[in-house]
Amino acid sequence: MTSKSQKTSAAEPTSARARILETALRLFYAHGTRAVGIDRIIAEAAVAKMSFYNHFPSKADLVAAFLEERHARWMTWFHGRLDTRRGKPGAQLPAVADVLREWFTAPDFHGCAFINILAETARSSKRERDIASRHKDELLALLAERAKADGVARPAEAGRLALIVVEGAIVRAEMTGAGARVAADAKRLLECLVAPGLKA
């Protein structure tokens, strides 16, 4: 998911809230929510401190808004890219790896924002964990749907296994920087989940 695809339809956000959120999306994803302070967000968004707090009373509110927006944009992008790869049954779930390859090899790839925020600190708030869980639940449902389209006998189970493959691939791609190779390995594993012996 490239920077271009993360941006809103407006070429340049004009409202203070939009500038703050766009800045948070960029900085929090690249550097982490703990490493980026409010003062940096305010400076790079070019807003007054009072304006910032009018829109986001606390950093926790901004982090939650960042996660919600990241979830919405990433899922929209992911669904869109998958929709261009709806081939014959047996190819639906493996095609997920092709989309992952696009994401992994993008210059602004920094892993999964939701895995990252939970890994940053053991003290992640319930609010953050709830948003992250909702993101993963939606991704799980999508994977199960693809498995069902492939004729897998137990699509819910295949979806759970596929999610482990996807999340492992995300972490591995971020750690190694070898996104194309990791995606290729993930595709082989996803193909195993739709092998003839596992179908109805």
Image (cartoon, rainbow, N blue to C red):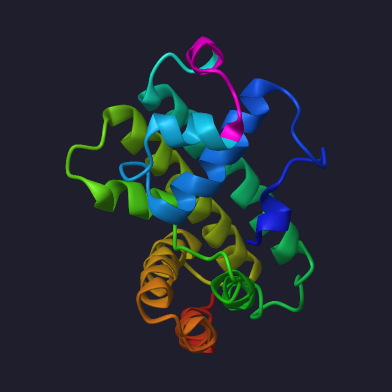
- Residue lying at 53% horizontally and 80% vertically, measured from the top left: 194
- The percent position of residue 55, horizontal first and vertical second, equals 54, 15
Q: Residue furthest left?
A: 122
Does residue 188 appear to the left or right of 94 in the view shown?
left
Q: Is residue 48 magenta?
A: yes
The reply to whether residue 68 is visible in this rendering is no
The reply to whether residue 186 is visible in this rendering is yes
Between 47 and 123, the residue placed more toward the observer is: 47
- The percent position of residue 61, horizontal first and vertical second, equals 42, 23
- Residue lying at 66% horizontally and 61% vertically, measured from the top left: 2
Eyeballing the image, is 30 above or below 104?
Answer: above
- The percent position of residue 31, horizontal first and vertical second, equals 40, 53
Give, as a single range, the part of the protein colored magenta: 45-54
Q: Quadrant of the N terminus?
A: bottom right
The number of discs equals 0
Magenta part mainly helix, strand or loop? helix
Does residue 109 appear to the left or right of 173 in the view shown?
right
Does residue 55 appear to the left or right of 125 in the view shown?
right
Q: Is residue 96 magenta?
A: no
- Residue lying at 65% horizontally and 22% vertically, measured from the top left: 16
Eyeballing the image, is 30 above or below 166?
Answer: above
Q: Quadrant of the C terminus?
A: bottom right
Between 25 and 72, the residue placed more toward the observer is: 25
